[in-house]
Image (spheres, grey):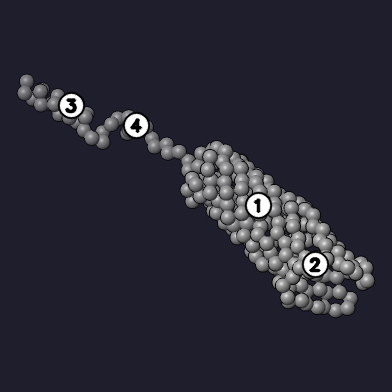
Amino acid sequence: MKKISFFILALFFSYNAPGQDADKVLIPDSSPTFFESHHYWAIGLHYSSADRFSSDAYISGSVNGSVNYEAKTDTAFTLSAEFGQSKSEGLGFNAGLGYDTKRTISSITAKGAGGTSTSNKASDSFSVTTVYYNPVYYFDRIALNAGINYSIPKYEPAEPGYVAYATGAIGYQAGLSYFANEKFLLNLDYRVIKMDLDLSYPTLIIDFGRIEIKGIQFGVKYLFK
C-alpha cells in the first residue's frame, strides 16, 4: 500500500513540475515576422550625392549655335514625407513628397565651335521638390523599390534681369531599404531627377532642353501608424 501511495505522489509531482507543461511542449514556436502588414506615415532625412548636370544647349539671339554645358553644383539634403503600405512579405508601395535643399552652381564648362571655356565663380542656384511613387517588395526586414518621380523645380539666376523658365519632368529611382526596428528605416536609392530649363538673358536665350540630376541618395525614415 505504501509503495502504491509513493508511486501516485511521484506521478503527481512529476506532472506539475516546472517546465513540463504539455501544451508548451507540443505547440511549436510560431513567432510573428518582423514587420506586419499595415499602412504607415513616415518623415525622412536624406543626403543626395548628385552634384552636377550636363546639357546640349542651343543659344539664340546675338549669338547662335549649339553648346555643350557641364555644371558642377553643391550636394543637397532631402526632406521627405511619405505614405505607404508595408508587408511582412509581398508587394506594397510608398508615395510622397521630397524637397531637395538649394544647390548653388559652382562652375560651368561650355564647349562649342569656338572652343572651351570654364567659369569658376559661384553662379545660379536651384531647388527641387519631387512627387514620387514606388512599388515595394518586402522580405521581412529588407525591401526593394523601383518607381518614378516628377520634379517641381525652382531656378534662381544669380544676375538681376535674367529670367529662368524651369519646368518639371518625369524621372525615376530604384533602391533598397532595411528596417532597423519598427520605427526606423534605412534607405539607399539611385535617383534621377529631370527638368527642362531655358534661360533668358538681355541679348540671348539659352535653351538647355532636358537636364538630369542623378546620384546616390541615402538616409533614414521615421515611421508611425
Q: Secondary structure at mark 2?
A: loop
Cα separation between marks 1 and 2: 29 Å
The residue carrying pointer 2 sits among few (fewer than 14), some (14 to 19) or many (20 or more) residues within 10 Å by Cα, namely: few
Q: Earlier in the sequence, mark 3 or mark 2?
A: 3
Q: Which mark is residue 160?
A: 2
Image position of 20 with respect to 123: above or below:
above
Element carrying mark 1 = strand
**Which is more toward the observer, 19 or 189?**
189
Indicate the position of residue 124 as horizontal and vertical percent values: 75, 67
| Disc sitting over residue 26 in the figure | 4
Q: Residue at x 73, y 76 (%)?
A: 120
Label 2 amino acid?
Answer: Pro
Q: Earlier in the sequence, mark 1 or mark 2?
A: 1
Q: Residue 10's spot in the image, x, y percent? A: 15, 29
* Secondary element type, mark 4: helix
Front residue of this view, candidates 115 and 138: 115
Q: Give the mark, 3 or 4, whose residue is nearer the N terminus.
A: 3
Marks 3 and 2 sit apart, C-alpha to C-alpha, by: 95 Å
Q: Which residue is tagged 3?
A: 12
Disc marking residue 98: 1
Looking at numbered disc 3 in the image, what kind of residue is underneath it? Phe
Q: Relative to 111, is 175 on the left or the right?
A: left
Of marks 1 and 4, which one's residue comes earlier in the chain? 4
As measured in the structure, the alpha-carbon distance from the residue carrying label 3 to the one carrying label 4 is 20 Å
